[in-house]
Image: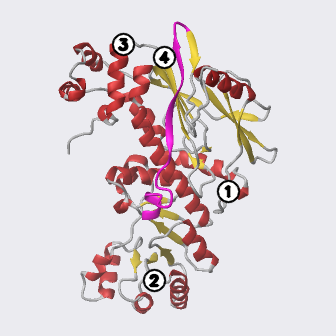
Amino acid sequence: MKPRSLALATDLYELTMAAAYFCKDIRSEATFELFVRELPPQRRFLVVAGIEQALEYLAELRFSQEDIDYLQQHPSFRAVPQAFFDYLEGFRFEGEVWAMPEGTVAFANEPLVRVTAPILQAQIVETFLLATINFQTMIASKAARVVAAARGRPVIEFGSRRAHGSEAAMYAARAAYIGGCTGTSNVEAGLRFGIPTFGTIAHSWVMSFDDELTAFKGYMEVFPTTTTLLIDTYDTVAAAKKIVSAGLKPQAVRLDSGDLASLSREVREILDAGGLTATRIFASGDLDEYRIAELLLQGAPVDAFGVGTRLSTSADAPNLGGVYKLVEVAADHERKARVKTSPGKVTLPGRKQVWRVTTPEGVYEGDWIALADEERPTSHAQPLLRLMIKDGHRIEPQQETREIQERALANLAHLPEALRSLEAGPGLPVRATARLLAEQQRIAARCLGR
């Protein structure tokens, strides 16, 4: 397969604006911030993910000769001078990036990422940053809810075959692990990110044999200590009885259809009566946080869950409305903050920092959005944005995915209990400082000619 061209993994207007900046000799430094305007329905927090891939992209961004040849032949660039394409040959991201570390819990309107660079460079990277961070943050946030509903029982991400493409499947597995899943069925994610991988068997294995028991025995001969037998191909209860009668001792059995609550109770009784108290029950089949919560409320003796489609696509909230907006330009050693005043899309001006306030008991109390040069709003506030890239070079070392998951779990544990429930409601209070609001009003009045 032909390698992807990440330099062209963007919207056309990013590149045409870049050419216009170049041709009009606009070299000013610009600051853009990436944030989510509103939390999706049924979400009371976000778990930030995708930052690592964003940093890798910025550090390695290059235009190949093939990329440049394609752009030169594109009708939109017919009048663009050769000098622009010569510039692309040596293109490098030379700016700085501040971001919330992956696994940080965040809320609406808070900058998750702040990019400061020559405006041409900062503009080109918009689409990739949004696509990467929006998607993984959406999945990690969904996973955190599913894991919370499981009440300490392992949750395995099972959604690769229903994800929106193989690359999305791999990054959904990564984001789900950051959100708290125990592992994934996606082997590529296991290789690339060190995520534990798990699998059972498919109905096709069972159906390829003349009888179910022979299928079970054959598989367990190859995998004697790690087999999870799928027992709902024909008759779930009958299959459980066959396992006991044959003296098989699988690690687990998997229920994938039917009334999971009643079937799990019946199967548990059969296994226990046959001495298979150590054999766990693994449930899957169109599960999400609500279905899992319902099963446990019904007393279903399920030991672990496999969650696929509804997790890897975040089915109930399948997109995250992250945006990337210009907040400051600087030229001739003068910084000028910018705001957008469109109805429903008003922005806050200038480079900003997010400060988190925690109660003496360690519970998150609220966040403040402040201008980057403001003092901390309260003595107990801690900054969330960290410098990740300076002068185009990474200064924040890459972290193991397990470390990122640990940060996410720690952040989630500090949330107020109401926010960790599945009940709808507001997120943590997020306020802008008085100075930031005054600056917003001043700039907006100037833009509107008041």
Q: For mark 3, does the 10 Å Cα neighbourhood hold few (<14), some (14 to 19), or many (20 or more) residues? A: few
Q: Which of label 2 and label 3 is nearer to you?
A: 3
Horizontal placement of 223 versus 275: left or right? left
Q: Position of residue 144 (x, y in %)?
A: 57, 56
**Mark 4 or mark 2, which is nearer the start of the sequence?**
4
The amino acid sitting under disc 1 is Gly
The span from disc 4 to disc 1 (Cα, nearest Å) is: 40 Å
Q: Which residue is mark 1?
A: 425
Between residue 257 and residue 340, name the one nearer to us.
Answer: 340
The amino acid sitting under disc 4 is Glu
What residue range appears in magenta? 309-333
The span from disc 1 to disc 2 (Cα, nearest Å) is: 32 Å
The kind of secondary structure element at disc 3 is loop
Residue 258 — which label? 2
Q: Which of label 1 and label 2 is nearer to you?
A: 1
**Mark 3 or mark 1, which is nearer the start of the sequence?**
3
Q: Which residue is mark 3?
A: 24
Q: Which residue is mark 4?
A: 29
Picture quadrant where residue 327 is located: top right
The correct choice, above or below, for 49 with respect to 353 in the image is below
The amino acid sitting under disc 3 is Lys
Judge whether residue 301 is colored magenta: no
Contact, CB < 8 Å: mark 2 with mark 3? no
Q: Position of residue 265 (x, y in %)?
A: 56, 86
**Mark 4 or mark 3, which is nearer the start of the sequence?**
3
Between residue 247 and residue 1, name the one nearer to us.
Answer: 1
The span from disc 2 to disc 4 (Cα, nearest Å) is: 60 Å
Horizontal placement of 371 versus 29: left or right? right
Q: Which of label 2 and label 4 is nearer to you?
A: 4
Between residue 25 and residue 251, name the one nearer to us.
Answer: 25
